[in-house]
Image: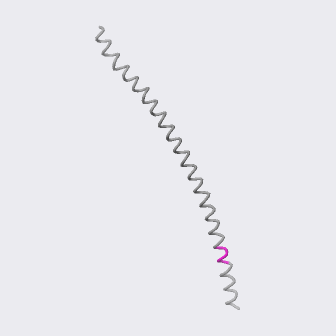
Amino acid sequence: MNHDLLTIAVPTITVLIGILMNRNDYAKLDTRIGGIETRLDSRMSSLDGRFHADMMQVIGKLTELEVRVARLEEKVSR
């Protein structure tokens, strides 16, 4: 009787301990993934800001170029 009880209890307790340890590992993994996600969001926002600033500069240069071409066309057509 005792032998049968040990045969059932030891594996059951081992499985329960394994489940609890895995839950803890998943919680740590979830925390690490959350941190990575936060850093990635921060970097993407920084890149988006720089890209927007660079695009505004390019648009400004293109506008200047358009004005210059329009003046040249005016001079040529006179």
Indicate the position of residue 21 as horizontal and vertical percent values. 42, 28
State the residue at coordinates (59%, 53%).
45
Please say if 66 is above or below 74.
Answer: above
Please say if 11 is above or below 76.
Answer: above
Main secondary structure found in the magenta portion: helix
Q: Quadrant of the C terminus?
A: bottom right
Q: How many marks?
A: 0
Tell me the quarter of the picture where residue 55 sits.
Answer: bottom right
Q: Quadrant of the N terminus?
A: top left
State the residue at coordinates (67%, 86%).
73
Indicate the position of residue 77 as horizontal and vertical percent values. 68, 90
30 inside magenta stretch: no
Indicate the position of residue 35 as horizontal and vertical percent values. 53, 42
Q: Is residue 74 left or right of residue 27?
A: right
Tell me the quarter of the picture where residue 8 sits.
Answer: top left
Indicate the position of residue 20 as horizontal and vertical percent values. 44, 26
Range of magenta residues: 62-66
The colouring scheme, among rainbow, by chain, secondary structure or one colour, is one colour
State the residue at coordinates (59%, 57%).
48
65 inside magenta stretch: yes
Tell me the quarter of the picture where residue 71 sits.
Answer: bottom right
Q: Residue 63 versus residue 31: which sits nearer the camera?
A: 31
Q: Residue 61 versus residue 77: which sits nearer the camera?
A: 61
Q: Residue furthest top?
A: 1
